Structures are given as C-alpha cells and as structure tokens.
Amino acid sequence: MSPLPVELGDGALLRRLRMDDLEDVWSVVEAERERLAVWMPWVEHVRTIEDERRFLETVTADPRGLDGLGLFVEGRFAGGVGMRLDPFGIVADIGYWVASPWEGRGLVTRAVRALLSIAFDELGLHRVTVRAGVENLRSRAIPERLGFTLEGILRGEGRGTGGFYDLAVYGLLEDEWRTGR
Ligand SMILES: CC(C)(COP(=O)(O)OP(=O)(O)OC[C@H]1O[C@@H](n2cnc3c(N)ncnc32)[C@H](O)[C@@H]1OP(=O)(O)O)[C@@H](O)C(=O)NCCC(=O)NCCS
C-alpha cells in the first residue's frame, strides 16, 4: 500500500481525497476557477458541485488510486495533485495545481518529490513524466527543480481559456532519480 498520507512539513499533508472533502474542494475550485482554467482543461467541465462530486466519486472508487490526491495545510484543502499510472507498471504522469494563497511555498515541489518516491520505491515504475504548458514557467520549474529532462514539445496538446497550447514534456527515469537524489 502506498505510504499515504505523507507529511510535507510546515503543517502540510498530501493525502487521498475523500467524499467528505467535497465542500472544501468545490469552494477552492470556485475561487480559483479563472486562474486554473488558463492551463487546465478539466476546469470547464466542473461547473457545479455535482460535477465535483462525480470527480470525487471516480477518484475515491479505487482506495489505492493515486490520481485524486489533495494538498492540505493545517487541515484546509490547498490544491490538487494526481499521478496517473499506465496499466503495465512502466510509467506514470503527474499533474498538479495549488490555490494562490499557497503558491510559492514549495508545497507542490515537495508533493511531487513524495510521489516520485512512491512511483520508484513502492511501485517499481521505470519512468515518470510531467507535462506543462511551454509558457507556464511556474509549472515547468517544478520538474526542472527535481532533475527531470526536457524531452520534447507536444504541439497543441494542452487547452485552456486561451485555446490550444503546446506542452513541454519532462521525463525522469528511475536510475536518474536514484543517482540524483
Ligand atoms: C504551477 C503551480 C502548481 C506552481 O506552484 P508553485 O507554488 O510555484 O510551486 P511550489 O509549491 O513547488 O513552490 C515553488 C516556489 O516555492 C519556493 N520554495 C519555498 N520552499 C521551497 C521548498 N522547500 N522546496 C521547493 N521550493 C520551495 C521556490 O523557490 C519557488 O518559489 P519561486 O517561484 O519564487 O522560485 C501553480 O503556479 C499553479 O497552481 N498554477 C495554476 C495551475 C497550473 O498551471 N497547474 C499546472 C498545470 S501543468
């Protein structure tokens, strides 16, 4: 079983989302909607609290799932993190967002580092990827800070309020992670 929840320091916790997080998650998504929608296509599909409930139902259906995690600071929901695994145990892709009051504190970097440990130490994966908008420099800084390699550009693979945009793909292999940490 994955070692969650993980303490990230400074009162921050990474844990699986639960159905009873619904009100908290919904209120943060509502407050941050405009900012998040610039980069994240799911935001336009979460229009009501019922849409949010369906998301939580999906991610909580698998008690071992890793694609519906929450960042909590002093017990308050602060952002979403997810790691989606391929069916063969080779690769996982990590996505993230944090609410603006908690931006710039290293919470997401620490959460992604914790997920890398789960991916490589617990799950025995070979490779982890992060995709970030080419112009989303804050997002790109996270894999860069963690030693990922920029592998290429996926043309038009992202979509936000400004339309389709190019994604920078970052990859980290298991042996690179072991030698780099
Ligand atoms: C992209 C996003 C998640 C980045 O958030 P962030 O707060 O910059 O990332 P972190 O939590 O890792 O914080 C990094 C910052 O904390 C600082 N920091 C402080 N303590 C730190 C620590 N222990 N470890 C790492 N960084 C730390 C870093 O120096 C950095 O600050 P800087 O930007 O001034 O250099 C955030 O901007 C966001 O949610 N954007 C909107 C949604 C989005 O774009 N999601 C990504 C889609 S691909």
Image: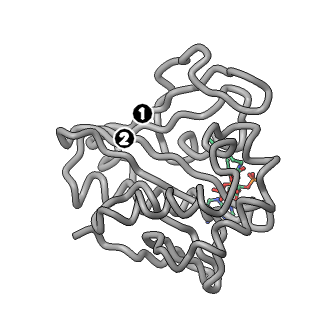
Where disc 2 sits, the SS reads strand
Q: Which mark is residue 140?
A: none
Q: Residue at x 38, y 38 (%)?
A: 172
Residue ID at (27%, 68%)? 2
Q: Nearer the viewer, residue 60 or 164?
A: 60
Taking the image as shown, residue 116 lies to the left or right of residue 39, namely: left
Amino acid type, callout 2: Val
Quadrant containing the N terminus in the rendered view: bottom left
Where's the C terminus, which quadrant?
A: bottom left
Q: SS at mark 1?
A: strand
Which residue corresponds to mark 1? 171
**Towards the viewer: 55 or 174:** 55
The answer to whether any part of residue 141 appears in the image is no
Ligand 1 - quadrant of the structure image = bottom right
Residue at position x 59%, y 46% in the image: 142
The local crowd at label 2, few if under 14, some if 14 to 19, many if 20 or more residues have their Cα within 10 Å, is: many
Measured Cα–Cα span from mark 2 to mark 1: 6 Å
Q: Label 1 crowding class (10 Å Cα cut-off): few <14, some 14-19, many 20+?
A: many
Please identify the residue farthest to the top as the structure is shown. Answer: 155
Tell me the residue that label 2 is attached to.
128
x and y percentages locating residue 85 in the rendered image: 31, 45
- Where residue 13 appears, as percent x and y from the top left, is 52, 77
